[in-house]
Amino acid sequence: MVAKIWLVTHMDLHRTAKVQSFVRHLKSEVMTWPVDDPGASDATPSTVRREAPPDAPTGARREAGRGHLAMLAFSALIAGSFSLGGQIANDIDPAALNAVRFTIAAVAVYAVLSPGRASARGARCAVAIPPARRPLRGLFRDDVRGAEDRAPGLGLGGVHADAGDERGVRLVLLRQGVSAASRWRWPSGRRGRSG
Amino acid sequence: VIFRADWVAIREFEIGPGEAIFFWGCVAHAAYTPLVRLLNRGEPILAFSFLTLAACAGLLLIWGVREIVATDWAGLRPLVWVTLIYVALIASSTTVFLVQYAAMRLPSSKVMAYTYLTPSWVLIWELALGQPVPPVLVLAGVG
């Protein structure tokens, strides 16, 4: 049986040097693992997946279609501001207009950002984040420090990383009933992108 | 963010000699979409839009404080208020969200290519707004 490994990190940490280095390390290690079932030809022995849903091509096309639709709507809506703006250009100072404009715009978007939406997002998050570490209405990224002390993430396990300003990455691997936890540290003196 | 706001102001009101400012506005505007991709690290688009707009508002409130105080807000034509609400809710909130939504799903060049479509839409809008008895203006309570 081929064991699938899900590498679960916080979205804030995917691109950090330490996580990427760890992925490389893990990939090279996994290559040496024995393949128990040669019959499973469609599955590669070293499967390290990161944010790759099975229907990725179809999903990507649908997302691109939504992007095109959004920009079509954008071009039509922004054009209205030129027509309207041209008619009142001499009635009001542009600085005053735009200052009030962006203030109203920001308030409107803030009103749409409901607390319920933020908590729903938190509930879907693979890493368990206590509510106190989810900042104002989901406006800012979660504080992941301490999250690795919680239960492992999706499925059988995952890598639980410390925040960007710390150096550790903790590996929790639960493979076929055998649990192994180790602490992997980046050599001191070399640091990934912090913050 | 400042340049983006300037770009909007210039495109809408055609103030000043403009060309040099317009050039830098274009440069900043071109950098905007790739930067959205670069700087978004998983935040919801709405949160990203809010912070962009809030920063715009903050800078413009400081930059335009004298003009705001000098403006006779009570004496403005109704069409000015209609335009103000439109550019705030539709041409700022909605479009900033749409651009950032698209920027996360399309290559930046494709996103920016849609701005070439805007002049065609402006023509359609002018046709709709410029007729002898413009239905949109009647709705807006101007006459």
Image (tube, rainbow, N blue to C red):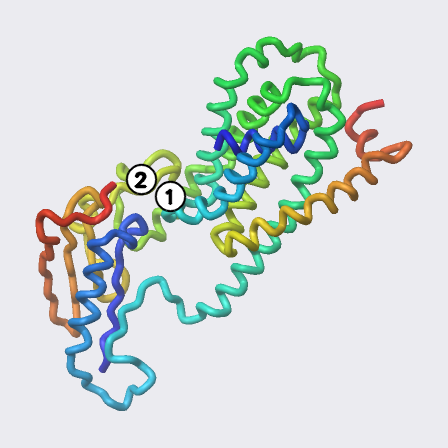
Is A3 placed above or below A150 here? below
How far across and how far down the image is residue B90, in percent? 63, 36
**Dividing the picture into quarters, in which one does residue B26 lie?**
top right
Q: Are the two marked residues, 1 and 2, in contact with CB atoms closer than 8 angstroms?
A: yes
Mark 1 vs mark 2: which is more N-terminal? 1
* Pointer 1 chain: A
Residue A119's disc is 1
Identify the chain of the residue marked 2, using the numbered disc in the image.
A
**What residue is drawn where x is 54% and y is 63%?**
A62
Number of other residues with Cα within 10 Å of mark 1, as a class: few under 14, some 14 to 19, many 20 or more: some
Q: Nearer the viewer, residue A102 or A192?
A: A192
Are discs 1 and 2 located on one and the same chain? yes
Q: Picture quarter containing residue A65? A: bottom right
The tag on residue A134 is 2
Q: Label 2 is placed on what type of residue?
A: Arg
Mark 1–mark 2 Cα distance, whole angstroms, equals 8 Å
Quarter of the image for the C terminus of chain B: give it: top right
**Residue type of the residue flagged with mark 1:** Ser
Pinpoint residue A117: horizontal percent, then vertical percent: 44, 43
Determine whether B90 is above or below B13 in the image.
below
Please tell me whether mark 2 sits on a helix, a strand or a loop: loop
